[in-house]
Structures are given as structure tokens and as C-alpha cells.
């Protein structure tokens, strides 16, 4: 599940970057958050907007991101066959869910073809990242406690914090 969640983070970072570069690409967690806001009864939405201010939409988006991580983690865990992961199948499942999410609340500027191409790229990145992460975390490799591993973990954490700040900010 850790490999799937981390691979989801990489795929979501790619989708977020592509949606930031082009308004024709939909970012599925934002689409889900917009759909939740649209479907929430007026009194409830008004209460949360007054109580949380600008943080209301950010928190809903953060919840959608958490759901995306869970979907990626669970898809990776559920697609194991004969004690081997099937990251491409998991990537296809994750992207199918992301495509449905993007269709729930389509942006006026989002287009189907660029979003579909971005989702295919995200599935590929998910599969590659999940494979690499799983291979590194699997017990058949001796643990690398050296300096380079610590630097990689630190750099990955810094990138994750920067991406999270970009999503929330």
C-alpha cells in the first residue's frame, strides 16, 4: 500500500502540474471538491464557508487528495497476483477512477483529449513509480542505510512539502 500511495503522489503531482500549465487539463481532486460544493445544501455550505472562510474549499480539496492517495494505495494492494504486483493494472484502475472524477465536475475550460492524454501519462508514471518504489521497499533488497538514501528521503520530503504547499496555497 505504501508503494501505491507514493506512486499516487507522483501521478497526482504530474496531473497537478499539467493542469496548472494548461487550463484544458482537469485536475480530478479539484473536480471532486467542486462537485461536493455544488451538491452540498445551501445552508450547510454557507455555514462551513462562514466558519472556515477561504479554507473551506482548500479542506475539501485536501480531503479529495487524501481519497486519491487511498484509491492509489488500495488499487496497488488489490492487484497482486502470485505475490507480484501488477502496477500497470493498478495504474489503469486509478486512472479510470480519476477519469470519472474529472467527468463529475467538468471545468468550462477543460477538454476531453488533453485530459485523457494527461491521464494516460499519469497511469504510466504511476506504474513506473509503483514498480520502482516496490522494488526498493521489498525485503529481498538489503536495507541501504547510507548517506544517499537519507538524502533521497529528505529531497522527496522537501518536494512533497513544496507540492502540498502549492496545492493548498
Image (cartoon, grey):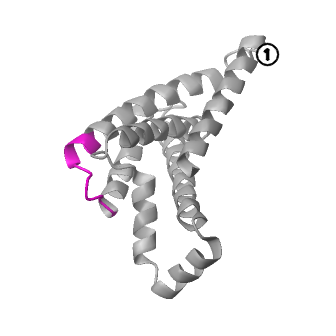
Q: Which residue range is magenta in the image?
A: 105-116
| 75 displayed left or right of 135 | left
The image quarter in which residue 102 lies: bottom left
Residue 132 seen from this side: yes
Name the residue nearer the viewer: 134 or 122.
Answer: 122
Residue 138 seen from this side: no
Q: Residue 46 in the image: state x and y as whole percent.
A: 53, 82
Instruction: Name the quadrant of the N terminus.
Output: top right
Q: Residue at x 46, y 63 (%)?
A: 33
Is the residue 58 above or below the residue 5 in the image?
below
Is the residue 135 above or below the residue 103 in the image?
above
Is the residue 40 above or below the residue 132 in the image?
below
* Total number of numbered discs in the rendering: 1
Question: Circle 1 sits on which residue?
Answer: 145
Q: Residue at x 31, y 46 (%)?
A: 23
Is the residue 71 above or below the residue 124 in the image?
below
Q: Residue 65 in the image: state x and y as whole percent.
A: 53, 52
Q: Residue 17 in the image: state x and y as whole percent.
A: 43, 37
Q: Is residue 110 magenta?
A: yes
**For mark 1, does the 10 Å Cα neighbourhood hold few (<14), some (14 to 19), or many (20 or more) residues?**
few
| 140 displayed left or right of 102 | right
The image quarter in which residue 146 lies: top right
Name the residue nearer the viewer: 89 or 63.
Answer: 63
Q: Residue 103 in the image: state x and y as whole percent.
A: 30, 58
Q: Residue at x 39, y 58 (%)?
A: 31
Q: Residue at x 58, y 27 (%)?
A: 134
**Element under disc 1:** loop
Amino acid at each position: 500500500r505504501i508503494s501505491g500511495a507514493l506512486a499516487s503522489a507522483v501521478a497526482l503531482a504530474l496531473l497537478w502540474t499539467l493542469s496548472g500549465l494548461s487550463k484544458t487539463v482537469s485536475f480530478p481532486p479539484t473536480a471532486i471538491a467542486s462537485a461536493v460544493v455544488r451538491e452540498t445544501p445551501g445552508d450547510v455550505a454557507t455555514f462551513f464557508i462562514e466558519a472556515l472562510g477561504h479554507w473551506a474549499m482548500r479542506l475539501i480539496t485536501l480531503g479529495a487528495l487524501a481519497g486519491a492517495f487511498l484509491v492509489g494505495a488500495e488499487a496497488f494492494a488489490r492487484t497482486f497476483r502470485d505475490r507480484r504486483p501488477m502496477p500497470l493494472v493498478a495504474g489503469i484502475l486509478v486512472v479510470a477512477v480519476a477519469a470519472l472524477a474529472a467527468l463529475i465536475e467538468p471545468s468550462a475550460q477543460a477538454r476531453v483529449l488533453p485530459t485523457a492524454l494527461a491521464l494516460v501519462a499519469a497511469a504510466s508514471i504511476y506504474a513506473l513509480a509503483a514498480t520502482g518504489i516496490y522494488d526498493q521497499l521489498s525485503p529481498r533488497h538489503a536495507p541501504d542505510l547510507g548517506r544517499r538514501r537519507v538524502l533521497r528521503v529528505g529531497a522527496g520530503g522537501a518536494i512533497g512539502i513544496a507540492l502540498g504547499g502549492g496545492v493548498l496555497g
